[in-house]
Structures are given as structure tokens and as C-alpha cells.
Image (spheres, coloured by chain):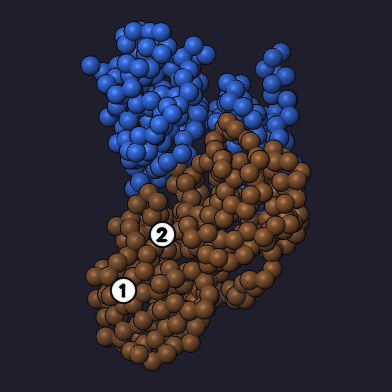
């Protein structure tokens, strides 16, 4: 049986496929890759149809491949990868033979990378997806992050899925993050809204699959929005906590929120938020719904 | 007359990013808005709205998530406005459930006292009328029921219990809630139930839907 024997796993290494959208009403966030564009590029790098990914975080991971020949695709951020000590290109593909050791180490940028195979990762399908929701311990490999010593079985792909359509270019880190004004934007003062667009924000060290917490730069210190009726939130929502700290909600977000949401980042730019390392500076720019739709097409 | 006015009072349609449309009936927790949200949820579910991939009922709003490649916000908003005058069609009747509660929660005595009731009076009053399921996306399988009459409302506790088990019955903010997973909560824990709303292997994974009617019963 083909399998991956995990020999090293950084925090938040997990099994992710395209996610389980449509479950928010049942209290389950969609999960899926933090950087969907990197997830797609890993398949493009493999050059063949692939199954679910192992998503790893900044510290990377290492595994030994067991079984017959297989194809590997690697992408997302820029990591340093090797096979049996020989450097691999990034993003890139590689043929795997029994006993090959793949080692993925931190590179110049990015928080999340993806290893995909011309096989499916044999974990149970839960609510239509193999993705791990680490917040509630649901799906993937026992509902949890992977760690050294785990073995992931690989099986044949169920069917030839989607085309290997071009996944687009790697994100440009210098452009502003584009957003649509949030459902509570009108509750913020004009000055607060202007400052949100004019002031750079620094990514804090508190980033995970639930959200990206920004460093409080003081612009929301005066906002006093109380007693909102909680309702469901979506990935990309920018919530401003009571103390003025903004948090951008990500793939494993809690399903509902009661904090005011000043903005919602468009899907196209969410991968750049996911890949921004602590200390990175982000700027935000509002766009129209028409522009956002053109980006999504 | 009041019903007709309520039906035509404009809801607010808001963009939620590039793939969401929020239909907001009120900004505050109002009984009438909760009813309108449920009614709209039921109608929207049957309407076959173009490009819509998910409909999520909230307490006083409904979120439609759509595929922006299939429909624009403006086109969808037009379709949504056409639904406001429509009644739910037969076949969408709410489910009715009886759910037994063991009123044994650690906060029960305090809740009753703060409402000026004895323990038994509180239980009787709590279970007197059926409640509607208002929504539940807070956690997997979680549901809120309500709203309670004004004299049965308490705010949340000032402190948070780090965990309560599945099947906990919670009380606050004019609602009774049932947990399906282990969660932290700032609500008052008034009891527990054997009713299990969540089955992750089933589709849909929850038994109760917004708009269903629940009659609570005390178990000894």
C-alpha cells in the first residue's frame, strides 16, 4: 500500500482538499486550503490530476514515501525542498520511488505550502470533504494536525477530476489587499474608515487557520460599537475586536461572530493574507462589486 | 394589516465580500425580525435562486452565498426583492419536535432567582409555549430557540465556562440553546438533554432547521 510516513511536521500541518462549502448553516466552516491558489499550483506543478493536499506551515515537513511510483507536486509560498538530499525546484514536481525522503524547509516567503500526489489521501470523507477543521477537530486525519510518526495511506484517485487549468501567478506582495466594505462599515466613523485605507497594518505573530490577527495600530482605539446581534461570518471578514485589534477571518473561522466587521477581503486576495508572515505590512484598498466580480471571473 | 405592512417594510440588502448577499431585517434582536428571517429563509430555500450555493439563516438576517461567475450581486438582489412578497408554499411546513430536558444545570437556581421565580415555576414557564428554532451556526449542530417573553430574559453571564458537554441546555439573551459539541459558553447552563441534533455522517447533518417548532418537556 502506498503511504507517506511523516518524519517531521511543523505546527498546523493538515490534510486539506477544496473544502466543504455549504455547511455554515450547520455551524461548520468550509476549511480547505489557506492559499487556494497555491493548492491549485501544486497540482499544476505535478502536471497530472491530484487528490487532497498535505498543507504545511512555515516550518515545513519531511516524509518518507513508501510504495510504487508516484508523482508529487509542490507549491505555495517559497519553501526549500529536497529529495534524498538533492534540491528540488519550487514550485515543482517530482517522481517518487519507494523509500524516497522528501524534506521541506522554510524558504524566503510564505506561511503555507502544499504537497499533492497523483493519488488520493485515504482519510474519511466527512460532509463531502477530506479537509481538516482543526478548530473543532473534524475531518482529515482524526480531526487533528499531522505529526511525526503518522502514516497517511494513499489510494487511487476516484475519478479524473478537474482540468489542470492555469492557477494564475504567484501573488504580488506589494499590491494593496482589496476589499468590499463590510456589513458594519457604516457603524465606523468616516475617519476610522479613511484610516483603515490609508494606514498600513502589520501582521502579528498570532496567525493560524482561524484567522490573521493584525497589530493594533491605534486607529480603532475610539470605536465603541456594542451589542451587535451575532450572525454568521465568512472567510475574509475583517472583525474589529473591542480593544481595536483587527482580525481577518480565515478558512477555519468560527461560524458566527458578534464583533463589527469593517471589511471583507475579496477571495482573490485572501491567499496573500494567508501567506503574509508576522511583521509583514499590509495595506487595504476598497473596490467596487463590479471590479471584484471581474477578479473572480 | 400589520402583517402586510411588515412584509413590505424594506429589508436591507448588503454585500458580504465578493460572493455573499446579506438580507437584513433588523439590527436589533426583535421578535418580528426573527419571524421574517425564518419566513424568508424558507421561501429562499425553495426559490431556486440563480447562482446561490448556500443559504444561512441568522437571528434577524439571512446570508445568501453565491458563485460570482454565475450571477452578479445586482442581479441576485433583484431576484431577492421579488421573493419578499411571496408566501412559503406548502411542503415547507415546519417540523415539530418534543425535547426532554433534565433541569439540573448548575445555573438553574440562580436563573430562577434572578427572574423572581421558584425553580419549579421557572421550569413550568420555560416549557409553557412551544419555541421556534431561530438558527444555529454558532458551532456544529448548535441551535437557538426563542424568543422568550420579556419577563423571561437574562443577559449572558459575565464569566465564561471553558467547556460544556454536548447536550447542554443553555439560557440567555431571550433564547434557549442546545449544544452538540464541547464548547465554551457565557450562557447560563440550566440543564441537559439526550436529544442529539448533529450527525456528521448524515446529510443534512442536523435534525432541526430554522423555523421548526420545539416543545420542551421536563424530565425527572
Residue A273 is situated, as x and y percent measured from the top left of the image, at: 58, 62
Residue at x 34%, y 7% (from the top left corner): B118
- Determine the residue located farthest toward the bottom in the rendered image: A86
Query: Residue A131, which numbered label?
Result: 2
Q: Which hue is chain B drawn in? A: blue
Q: Nearer the viewer, residue B200 or A132?
A: A132
- Residue A155: x, y in percent? 32, 72
Q: In this rendering, do the residues under marks 2 and 1 share a single chain?
A: yes
Say which quarter of the image contains residue A198.
Answer: bottom right
- Please give the name of the residue rendered at 47% of the width and 53% of the height, measured from the top-left corner: A210
Q: Is residue A145 visible?
A: yes
Q: Residues within 10 Å of mark 1 (few under 14, many from 20)?
A: many
Quarter occupied by residue A144: bottom left
**A29 over B31 or under it: above or below:** below
Is A207 placed left or right of B169 in the picture?
right
Helix, strand or loop status at disc 1 = strand
Q: Secondary structure at mark 2?
A: loop
On-image quarter of the N terminus of chain A = bottom left
Residue marked by disc 1: A8
Disc 2 to disc 1: CB gap under 8 Å: no
Rendered image: mark on residue A248: none
Task: Tell me the chain of label 2.
Answer: A
Residue found at x 67% / y 60%:
A200
Label 1 resides on the chain identified as A
Asked whether the viewer can see residue B175, the reply is no
Look at discs 2 and 1 and give the one toward the viewer. Answer: 1
Distance between the alpha carbons at the discs numbered 2 and 1: 20 Å
Give chain A's shade: brown
Amino acid at each position: 500500500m502506498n503511504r507517506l510516513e511523516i518524519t517531521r511536521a511543523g505546527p498546523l500541518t493538515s490534510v486539506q482538499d477544496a473544502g466543504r462549502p455549504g455547511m455554515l448553516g450547520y455551524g461548520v466552516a468550509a476549511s480547505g486550503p489557506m492559499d487556494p491558489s497555491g493548492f491549485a499550483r501544486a497540482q499544476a506543478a505535478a502536471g497530472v490530476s491530484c487528490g487532497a493536499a498535505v498543507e504545511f506551515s512555515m516550518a515545513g515537513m519531511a516524509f518518507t514515501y513508501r510504495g510504487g511510483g508516484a508523482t508529487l507536486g509542490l507549491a505555495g509560498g517559497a519553501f526549500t525542498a529536497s529529495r534524498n538530499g538533492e534540491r528540488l525546484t519550487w514550485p515543482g514536481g517530482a517522481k517518487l520511488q519507494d523509500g524516497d525522503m522528501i524534506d521541506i524547509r522554510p524558504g524566503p516567503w510564505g506561511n503555507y505550502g502544499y504537497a499533492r500526489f497523483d493519488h488520493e489521501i485515504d482519510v474519511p470523507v466527512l460532509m463531502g470533504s477530506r479537509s481538516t477543521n482543526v478548530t473543532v477537530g473534524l475531518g482529515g486525519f482524526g480531526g487533528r494536525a499531522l505529526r511525526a510518526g503518522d502514516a497517511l495511506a494513499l489510494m487511487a484517485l476516484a475519478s479524473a477530476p478537474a482540468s489542470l487549468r492555469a492557477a494564475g501567478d504567484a501573488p504580488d506582495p506589494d499590491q494593496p489587499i482589496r476589499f468590499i466594505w463590510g456589513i458594519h462599515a457604516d457603524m465606523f466613523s468616516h475617519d476610522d474608515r479613511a484610516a483603515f485605507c490609508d494606514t498600513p497594518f502589520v501582521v502579528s505573530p498570532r496567525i493560524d487557520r482561524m484567522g490573521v490577527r493584525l497589530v493594533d495600530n491605534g486607529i480603532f482605539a475610539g470605536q465603541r460599537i456594542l451589542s451587535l446581534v451575532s450572525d454568521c461570518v465568512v472567510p475574509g471578514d475583517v472583525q474589529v475586536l473591542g480593544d481595536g485589534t483587527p482580525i481577518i477571518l480565515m478558512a477555519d473561522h468560527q461560524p458566527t461572530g458578534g464583533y463589527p466587521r469593517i471589511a471583507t477581503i475579496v477571495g482573490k486576495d485572501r491567499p496573500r493574507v494567508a501567506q503574509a508572515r508576522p511583521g509583514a505590512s499590509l495595506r487595504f484598498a476598497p473596490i467596487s462589486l463590479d471590479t471584484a466580480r471581474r477578479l473572480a471571473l | 394589516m400589520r402583517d402586510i405592512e411588515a412584509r413590505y417594510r424594506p429589508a436591507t440588502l448588503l454585500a458580504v465580500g465578493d460572493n455573499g448577499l446579506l438580507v437584513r431585517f433588523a439590527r436589533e434582536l426583535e421578535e418580528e425580525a426573527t419571524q421574517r428571517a425564518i419566513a424568508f429563509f424558507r421561501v429562499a430555500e425553495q426559490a431556486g435562486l440563480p447562482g446561490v450555493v448556500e443559504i444561512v439563516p441568522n437571528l434577524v438576517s439571512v446570508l445568501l452565498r453565491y458563485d460570482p461567475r454565475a450571477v452578479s450581486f445586482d442581479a441576485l438582489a433583484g431576484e431577492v426583492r421579488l421573493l419578499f412578497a411571496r408566501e412559503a408554499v406548502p411542503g415547507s411546513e415546519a417540523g415539530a419536535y418534543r425535547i426532554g430536558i433534565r433541569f439540573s444545570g448548575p445555573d438553574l437556581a440562580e436563573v430562577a432567582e434572578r427572574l423572581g421565580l421558584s425553580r419549579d415555576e421557572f421550569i413550568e414557564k420555560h416549557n409553557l409555549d412551544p419555541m421556534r428554532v431561530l438558527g444555529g451556526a454558532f458551532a456544529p449542530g448548535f441551535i437557538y430557540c426563542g424568543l422568550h417573553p420579556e419577563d423571561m430574559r437574562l443577559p449572558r453571564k459575565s464569566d465564561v465556562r471553558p467547556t460544556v458537554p454536548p447536550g447542554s441546555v443553555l439560557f440567555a439573551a431571550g433564547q434557549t440553546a442546545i449544544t452538540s459539541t464541547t464548547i465554551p459558553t457565557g450562557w447560563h447552563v440550566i440543564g441537559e438533554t439526550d436529544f442529539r441534533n448533529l450527525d456528521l455522517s448524515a446529510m443534512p447533518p442536523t435534525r432541526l432547521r430554522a423555523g421548526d417548532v420545539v416543545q420542551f418537556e421536563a424530565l425527572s
